Amino acid sequence: MTPPVGFIGLGLMGSAIASRLLTEQPLMVWNRSPSAAAPFAEAGASVASSAAEVFATCRTVFVMVTDEHAIDDILRSVDVTDRTLVVMSTVSPSRSAAFGERLAHARGRYVEAPVSGSRQPALNGELIGMIAGDDRLLDEVEALLDPVCARVVRCGEPPQAMQMKLAVNTFLVTVVTGLAEAFHFAETHGLDATLLQGILDVGPMASFVSRAKSAALVSGDFTPQAAVPDVLRNARLVVDSAREHRGAAPLMNECARLYAETLELGHGVDDMAAVVTAYRARSAALRM
């Protein structure tokens, strides 16, 4: 029988990606909160009792957890000898490079595989994958990502895939934040938000993301596709990496402040479109 592929981390994005992987190959999953694994057991996946069991059983293990600290916790408890760790989480490039060195010293293998896209594209198998590592490993990982990604781009050696993901996030975050500012501008000027939505949705800058976020801004439905805490974390990663390389990132600096304010306003489980509430709070303060 074909040995299962391992998948650790069944959060908002991880569960969507794992569900796509399960359509093409046997899967063994583990999540720190066991309840998240229940739907996968019903769908035919094996559920491990620990991360160590996943690594003991699976030759290739995908990880989509919160941050580098969660990856550290996993690596402290597993044997990576002759195993390939595929990190899909977005982490700092310097920490990613350190993970690669750590795996090499432990006779394991390391691949970066962050993705561009939110939950719905993940469920549809329409993510864009960015991978880095040894070419022979990338052949294997790229094939496994086929049900998940519309396209997979090889970026070189770690941490170049992580650096590329941060470049992509710089565009994504500033675009969505600018869109929220446009709707807030319309709001403060008494304009019809649905008219603005209609104009933007057929204009030259329209995209899947802009249409989805415009709809959320008009309806006020902030069901998470890309949650505020994740966006804030990614914005800070961009700012920190830019600073490390002595590069200017003024827009992302301000975005990080806005998403921090959005989180403080109580939108920890909401989509990034909820950043409009930070604009409203700032405007309210100006009127006091």
Image (cartoon, rainbow, N blue to C red):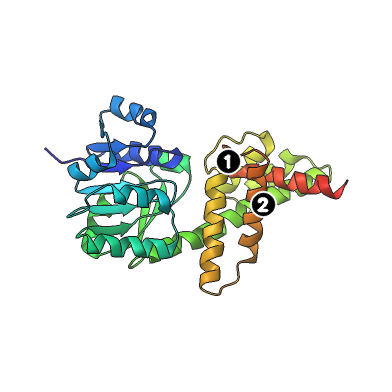
- Which image quadrant is residue 164 in? bottom left
Residue 23 makes an appearance in the image: no
SS at badge 1: loop
Query: Is residue 280 rendered to the left or right of residue 122?
Result: right
Q: How packed is label 2: few (under 14 Cα within 10 Å), some, or many (20 or more)?
A: many
User: Which residue is the site of mark 2?
Assistant: 258
Residue 179: horizontal and vertical position, in percent? Answer: 66, 50
Residue 184: horizontal and vertical position, in percent? Answer: 75, 46
Query: Is residue 29 rendered to the left or right of residue 165?
Result: left
Residue 253: horizontal and vertical position, in percent? Answer: 63, 61
User: Which residue is the site of mark 1?
Assistant: 271
Asked if 188 appears above or below 221 in the picture, the reply is below
Asked if 164 appears above or below 114 in the picture, the reply is below
Going by the numbered disc 2, the residue's amino acid type is Leu
Query: Is residue 56 rendered to the left or right of residue 87?
Result: left
Q: Marks 1 and 2, Cα distance to the nearest angstrom?
A: 14 Å
Rendered residue at 71%/46% (across/down): 278
